[in-house]
Image: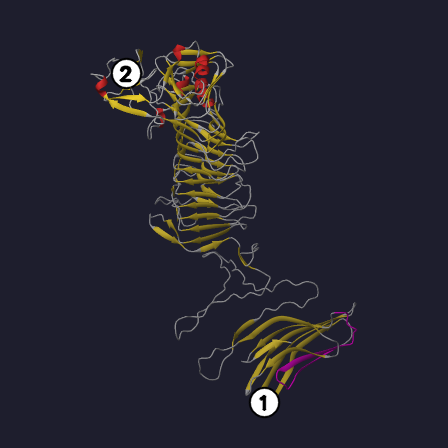
Amino acid sequence: MPSTKAPIQANGIIESLDGGILHPAYSWTAMPSNAASTAGTVTAVSTPMYGLAIDNGTSWLHLAGENANAAHWASLGTAIASLGATSISLMIPHKMSVSSNITVPNTVTLIFTGTGEISADAGQTVTINGPILAPPGRRIFGGSGSVVFGTVYAPYPISWFGALGDGSTNDSTTIQNAINALPTTGGTILVPATPNYYRLTSQLSFATRSRVRFIGEGGTGELDSVKFVWDGANGGVPFLVNQIRDSEFSNFSIVPGTGTILAGLEIDQIAPVTVTSTNNKFSKIHIGASTHGVRISNAATSNNDLHIFEDVYITGAGTNGYLINHSQAKFIKIIRGSVANRTNGINCTSGSFYSESGNFNANTADIYLGTPTDSILIVSPQSETSDKFIDDSGAAGNAWNVTVVGGRVDPNSVGVDNIYVQYRKRGALNLIGVDFASGVNYPNTRFNFNSSSPGATVNIIGCVFPNGTPYSVGTTRRIVSQGNMYIAADGSGQIIEHHVEGNVGINTTSPTNLLSLGGNSARTIWMERHTTADTAGNNLTAQAGGATSGATDKAPGSLILATGLGTGNATPGLVRLQGTDRSATSGTGDRSLIDRFIPNASKVLTNNSAIAVVNATIASNTSVGGKIVYTIEVFDGTDVQVETGEVFFGSYNKAGVVSGTATEVNSQQNLSAGTLATTWAISNANPAVISINANSSLTPSTGYPRITFSITNLGQQAIGIQ
């Protein structure tokens, strides 16, 4: 409703309501302006007893119901007592002192006119449960006592409590009085814009309330229209939000004056806890030079979480833009805004956060991770001229993921160590669609994922890097990189081939080598068959590393095939090289894989007994042939015997009749005592069985005689170890 512009007359009493507020919660009726020939003139108006009529220039506004004037009583307390439970509006036309506690019931509406003010003496409290109508730009509550609201019916300005914002008056106490007037159920406090600023020398404390709104009236984007300047002691905390929930703080700035600032804005939950600190919104706030722009601590054991920071701008030198400093300070949302010229833009020593469209500039580290206690998500960040985008303490911490999606973070001012992202946590780091180059080649910039503690996978998908070899990885870290690019020296974009760095496990969560398969069941690594019709299969090559190109007399690496590890006197595992057999006729049927070479098989023999070691299955009208290279050892606890030799074998199957020979050639013996006779034989059966009889004159110890042999299959039939 519009306010009056000139004095009016009500029942013969002239009152000035310049700048008065007509609250929409009350019943106002408009009457034709024929009661006054000219708007704003003093005219007798016929109204009810103690009635109030207000001329808005076009019509008279009449407050329905009866009205009273506190000037008719000796004191405000007497007026309130006399009115009792009557629903009425009570005008306060001049300053009225209160020397004892007073409670204004919710049936009484206080209307401040003229120089109206309630001044409570020290130690006295005025509790107001009803509505208030008063001009917004002047003081209506004073004295050394307290004014508290049982219910806040409408936003009220801090100027009602005497805050001036003239840049010289200490407004700390008057603003705190305005805050203290809030009931536990909250309400809205307005901070009028001023061409100067509100001077603070002591902390403004918001405590144990819900649904509080503390709003600067600076207008959209004009954060410095409402400015709080800290002239208190060095290391001050101008704003403390303690045990506040479901509240909003908006449209103002906090900057240092004659005193330095420890934390411009502190959100805490200081025990004993009566209201959990959670779900508060801080928007359109500017915080100047300070050790910490925003500090989220927790003196209790839970909560202080789910806070939202939207369009908060933290500038000037300092240690942290945001300090998230407790394990329960989780899911802190930081939307847009910026942090500049800080050691750490966001320092998550504990807890967790979500950042969206944040702008970082000229920080030592935009994101610093201590030991987060929940997942972290960073969406569409923007960064320039910072030493590092992500840095950490090096502590492994718990396995919480850190995910960065989109955005442009430019390493144009990477630090002297050339490390732009350093991440050594246990949780996975997911980099998805991030531009780390801004179209420029920075050949020395690195992304260090090395860790002395076991770390989870670094997943990099669809990113752009400033060079083609950006990663530094240790053996405890695994990188999966897919669909990434880099900026070459000529400015062109080049593909970083899909690759994996670090140990990778398949069916195991603890890989000990570059590629580890889970050991709880048999595994097969193979190449899929060609899918093009009537096409031969492709080669699969396993090749060890070569020496540096152009190096002098440098050996290549070795290709090593090894069995698994056994224990005790178990039979050793086999290395089996296989190939397909060959058919005598053309066709489309699949051929069979057969063992072509089996090195270093072994078996314990029985002295002076024929023991089978190899068998061969021979199809009708085919044959088998090959060679066995062997060593037989005998030990009796004192003496040793050894024989090494070769055996050629061959056998055929002619229409079901099998015949074969096994011939020992090129054998030699070395005996410390006694004699050793060996006899090889092959059965005329199918399968054909090759056996060895080792007859030692010694009395062999347990586990002897024993044979170690390699077999080469030179035919097209299957052979196997017996």
Query: Where is residue 119 drawn, in percent x and y?
Result: 44, 13
Q: Is residue 672 above or below residue 308?
A: below
Q: Amino acid at mark 2?
A: Ser
Q: Residues within 10 Å of mark 1 (few under 14, many from 20)?
A: some
Q: Is residue 560 above or below residue 69?
A: below
The residue that mark 1 highlights is 656
Query: Where is residue 157 drawn, in percent x and y?
Result: 39, 22
Residue 474 visible somewhere in the drawing: yes
Query: Where is residue 429 drawn, in percent x and y?
Result: 48, 47
* Front in this rendered view, residue 545 or 307: 307
* Front in this rendered view, residue 348 or 644: 348
* Front in this rendered view, residue 95 or 62: 62
Residue 470 visible somewhere in the drawing: no
Name the colour scheme: secondary structure
Q: Seen in the image, is 690 located left or right of residue 68?
A: right
Q: Seen in the image, is 653 located left or right of residue 432?
A: right
Q: Residues within 10 Å of mark 2 (few under 14, many from 20)?
A: few
Q: Amino acid at mark 1?
A: Gly
Query: Where is residue 313 drawn, in percent x and y?
Result: 39, 32
Q: Seen in the image, is 698 located left or right of residue 475?
A: right
Identify the disc placed on residue 666: none
Residue stretch rendered in magenta on the structure: 676-702
Q: Seen in the image, is 345 located left or right of residue 636?
A: left
Q: Nearer the observer, disc 2 or disc 1?
A: 2
Identify the disc placed on residue 46: 2
Secondary element at image label 2: loop
